[in-house]
Image (cartoon, rainbow, N blue to C red):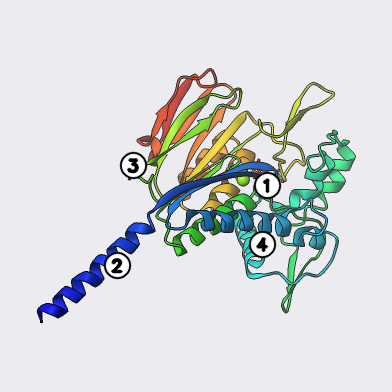
């Protein structure tokens, strides 16, 4: 009996020393993909292998979902081909359509002909004529994605997943991290920040909301297991010959870059795909419609900055938000339902 106890104890000690060897470590990787600077950090048993997998996933999704890479699945759809989508591609197309319906068309992947006409795909910016915009608005075809058995094609028009692909990729990264037993991770896909769990020390992640005008932050949000996804006109824009600034989010209703007094919208939610599409949609809606949308829909919070310096923070995130003094902000208002 004593022998058996000793044997079990010895086995236990061996096990413990083994888990001791596979000590949890924090590792990070930074790289450029999806048109933006990406940083991923994970704390886990085999952090290096997890990061290799993560970088590969981001690059694979870009190859499949970019509207500008000529051989991507999306480019092939846009060229009129029938494709056989893999499960992830079928899922993002489905989610994009749902978010379009949910936002009543403010998030609209079919706005791509206009994104292209204004030069946002190439950097050769131009202001299309009124008649060109009219004509291209006719090509913004809601619900043009069709399925035929295992194949998918477009009934017309063109689509762009640029307003949801990073959020969806973030969700896939975090799901993969969970499967690999990672308890703590933070990813930043060019302003799309998504957190798995808390910081390794158990405290909340502190996410800075960037000022649209300089490198400072206008405030800090504390989150665990959530994402903070921001859309702004200040990352990708051009100065037109008419002296106006044109940003890369296009109103599917007017065919023109959004210019409604909103300078940045951050959405805080559980799911990256939802927060990404919503941040784009709320930007299109403008201050009053966006806050009304928040009041009538559940499951997310909003931090919205206007060009006159009003910062709106919805009640669900109010206690987790700390303002920083910034030239961009003149007053902060809590928004209640
Ligand atoms: P970013 O990609 O800079 O983080 P967003 O998530 O707001 O910003 O997505 C903007 C991108 O989405 C644009 O570059 C364009 O490809 C696409 N897009 C522009 N306007 C819309 C829109 N109204 N609905 C859906 N996608 C859009
Ligand atoms: Mg977006």
User: For the point 85% across and 64% down, which residue is it?
Assistant: 80
Q: Earlier in the sequence, mark 1 or mark 4?
A: 1
Q: Which image quarter holds the N terminus?
A: bottom left
**Structural distance between the alpha carbons of marks 4 and 3:** 36 Å
Q: Earlier in the sequence, mark 1 or mark 3?
A: 1
Residue 215: horizontal and vertical position, in percent? 57, 24
Residue 286: horizontal and vertical position, in percent? 60, 36
Residues packed near mark 2 inside 10 Å, few (<14), some (14 to 19) or many (20 plus): few
**Structural distance between the alpha carbons of marks 1 and 4:** 21 Å
User: Disc number at residue 203?
Assistant: 3
Labels 1 & 4 near each other (Cβ < 8 A): no
As helix, strand or loop, the secondary structure at mark 4 comes to: helix
Q: Which residue is mark 4?
A: 93
Question: Residue 337: in sight, yes or no?
Answer: no
User: For the point 72% across and 45% down, which residue is it?
Assistant: 252
Q: Earlier in the sequence, mark 3 or mark 2?
A: 2
Q: Mark 3 CB in 8 Å range of ligand 1? A: no
As helix, strand or loop, the secondary structure at mark 3 comes to: loop
Q: Which residue is mark 1?
A: 33
As helix, strand or loop, the secondary structure at mark 2 comes to: helix
Residue 329: horizontal and vertical position, in percent? 51, 21
**Structural distance between the alpha carbons of marks 2 and 4:** 46 Å
Mark 1 vs mark 4, foreground winner is 1
Residue 140 vs 305, above or below: the answer is below
Labels 4 & 3 near each other (Cβ < 8 A): no
Q: Mark 1 CB in 8 Å range of ligand 1? A: no
Q: Earlier in the sequence, mark 2 or mark 1?
A: 2
Q: Which image quarter holds the C terminus?
A: top left
Residues packed near mark 3 inside 10 Å, few (<14), some (14 to 19) or many (20 plus): few
User: For the point 29% across and 67% down, which residue is it?
Assistant: 15
Residue 4 vs 124, above or below: the answer is below
């Amino acid at each position: 009996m004593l022998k058996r106890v000793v044997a079990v104890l010895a086995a236990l000690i061996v096990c413990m020393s083994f888990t001791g060897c596979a000590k949890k470590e924090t590792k990070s990787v930074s790289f450029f993909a999806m048109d933006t600077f990406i940083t991923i950090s994970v704390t886990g048993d085999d952090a290096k292998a997890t990061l290799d997998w993560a970088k590969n996933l981001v690059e694979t999704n870009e190859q499949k979902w970019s509207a500008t890479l000529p051989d991507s699945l999306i480019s092939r759809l846009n060229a009129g081909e029938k494709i056989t989508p893999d499960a992830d591609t079928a899922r993002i197309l489905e989610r994009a359509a749902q978010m379009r319906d949910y936002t009543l068309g403010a998030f609209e992947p079919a706005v791509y002909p206009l994104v292209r006409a204004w030069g946002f795909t190439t950097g050769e910016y131009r202001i299309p004529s009124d008649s060109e915009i009219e004509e291209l608005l006719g090509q913004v075809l809601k619900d043009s994605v069709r399925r035929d058995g295992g194949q998918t094609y477009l009934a017309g028009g063109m689509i762009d997943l640029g307003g949801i692909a990073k959020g969806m990729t973030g969700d896939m990264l975090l799901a993969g991290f969970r499967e690999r037993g990672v308890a703590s991770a933070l990813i930043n896909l060019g302003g799309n920040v998504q957190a798995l769990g808390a910081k390794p020390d158990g405290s909340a992640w502190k996410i800075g909301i960037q000022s649209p005008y300089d490198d400072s932050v206008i405030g800090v949000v504390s989150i665990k297991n959530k994402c903070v996804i921001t859309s702004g006109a200040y990352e990708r824009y051009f100065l037109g010959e008419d002296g106006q600034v044109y940003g890369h989010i296009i109103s599917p209703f007017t065919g023109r870059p959004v210019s409604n007094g909103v300078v940045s919208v951050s959405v805080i939610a559980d799911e990256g795909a939802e927060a990404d599409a919503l941040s784009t949609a709320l930007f299109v809606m403008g201050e009053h419609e966006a806050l009304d949308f928040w009041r009538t829909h559940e499951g997310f919070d909003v931090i919205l900055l206007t060009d006159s310096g009003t910062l709106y923070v919805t009640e669900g995130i109010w206690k987790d938000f700390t303002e920083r003094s910034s030239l961009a902000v003149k007053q902060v208002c809590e928004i209640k339902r």
